[in-house]
Image (spheres, grey):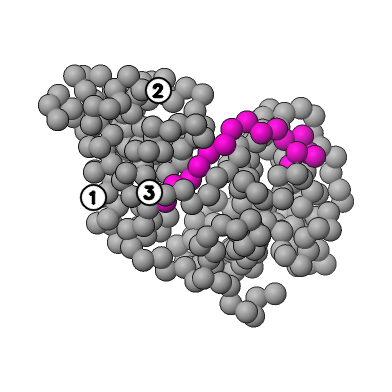
């Protein structure tokens, strides 16, 4: 379309305009991640010299979080169509990418319709929850930072916990992805933000801190419903606060019983996001974990 330019992101030119477009939108954190780590994976739409939208990826990997956003006053002009065509080309030609994931806030019917028309479907929905206030009481439990030798154990705790949760709430497809070296390197590079809980010297829970957000909290299935999740989450919330944050955020899949635990610890529901998926290559994940893990 005439007068539309799709250009690489330049912070000095585009950052303020995009931030204004996303004011109050939880999706801004995904753009921040792309800007911090993958700034060459952001493309900006300019129409008649005005910043009107953008396309971003959190790197090109097996499951790539994709953001396509057009300012409301410039929608229904074909700008989103140009951006999603660009995304399809980049993602389909990248050998590492199996699927794309797009977050969309509940109630944004025009965006949902747009992604449906372009081959996406809702994979799951997730509540964004927040907590502020005093630190939580902590138990006398053994917690330490992640180490590289923990990788296989932590990977399996996380994968199996989420596999079982998906089965419990009826999410399809259920899956298990085996350990891999790319993920292992990513974990060790981020080890200062990863924690493990130990019982009798064994790792029984894992969790991740990302700024003021708590994520990927998983308790080994045979240690669930014994109070370890509450103790571990309390530690992680306090660790975030010790790092200077006043508000702690997390996402919890709709239907996950863990939401009640978070509510009992003072978290309040703020918004609901739908995660839409589009496959570019066959899914390489296993449909279930190996039978010899726990």
Residue underneath mark 1:
89
What residue range appears in magenta? 262-277
Q: Residue at x 24, y 56 (%)?
A: 93
Q: Which of the labelled discs sits on residue 21, or is there none? A: 2
Residue 221: quadrant of the picture: bottom right
User: Are there few (<14), some (14-19), or many (20+) residues within 10 Å of tag 2?
Assistant: some
Question: Closest to the observer: 175 or 293?
Answer: 175
Q: Residue at x 71, y 59 (%)?
A: 219
Label 1 vs label 2: CA separation? 25 Å
Q: Is tag 1's residue or tag 2's residue first in the polypeptide sequence?
A: 2
Q: Is residue 278 visible?
A: yes
Above-or-below relation of 212 to 51: below
Q: Residue at x 33, y 63 (%)?
A: 281
In reply to whether residue 273 is colored magenta, the answer given is yes
Label 1 vs label 3: CA separation? 15 Å
In the image: residue 274, left or right of residue 72: right
Name the residue at the bottom extreme: 292
Q: Residue 135 location in percent, x, y?
A: 79, 34
Label 3 vs label 2: CA separation? 23 Å
Q: Is tag 3's residue or tag 2's residue first in the polypeptide sequence?
A: 2
Q: Nearer the viewer, mark 1 or mark 3?
A: 3
In the image: residue 213, left or right of residue 203: left
Q: Residue 149 location in percent, x, y?
A: 61, 67
User: Are there few (<14), some (14-19), or many (20+) residues within 10 Å of tag 1?
Assistant: few
Above-or-below relation of 102 to 45: below
Residue underneath mark 3:
120
């Amino acid at each position: 379309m005439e007068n539309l330019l799709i250009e690489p992101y330049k912070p000095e030119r585009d950052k303020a305009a995009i931030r204004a477009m996303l004011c109050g939108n939880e999706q801004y954190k995904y753009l921040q991640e792309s800007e911090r780590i993958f700034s060459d994976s952001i493309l900006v739409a300019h129409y008649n010299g005005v910043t009107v939208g953008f396309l971003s990826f959190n790197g090109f990997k097996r499951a790539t979080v994709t953001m396509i956003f057009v300012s409301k006053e410039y929608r229904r002009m074909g700008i989103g169509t140009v951006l999603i065509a660009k995304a399809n080309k980049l993602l389909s030609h990248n050998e590492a990418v199996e699927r794309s994931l797009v977050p969309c806030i509940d109630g944004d019917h025009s965006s949902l319709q747009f992604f449906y028309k372009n081959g996406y479907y809702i994979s799951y929905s997730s509540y964004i929850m927040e907590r502020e206030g005093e630190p939580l009481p902590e138990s006398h439990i053994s917690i330490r930072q992640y180490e590289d030798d923990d990788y296989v154990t932590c990977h399996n705790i996380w994968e199996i916990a989420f596999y079982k949760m998906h089965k419990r709430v009826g999410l399809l497809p259920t899956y298990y992805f085996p350990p891999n070296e790319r993920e292992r390197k990513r974990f060790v590079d981020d080890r200062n933000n990863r924690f493990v809980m130990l019982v009798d010297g064994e790792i029984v829970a894992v969790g991740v801190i990302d700024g003021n957000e708590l994520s990927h909290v998983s308790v080994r299935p045979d240690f669930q419903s014994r109070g370890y999740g509450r103790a571990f989450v309390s530690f992680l919330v306090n660790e975030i606060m010790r790092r200077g944050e006043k508000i702690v955020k997390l996402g919890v899949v709709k239907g996950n019983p863990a939401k009640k635990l978070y509510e009992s610890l003072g978290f309040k529901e703020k918004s609901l996001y739908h995660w839409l998926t589009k496959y570019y290559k066959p899914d390489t994940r296993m449909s279930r974990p190996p039978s010899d893990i726990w």
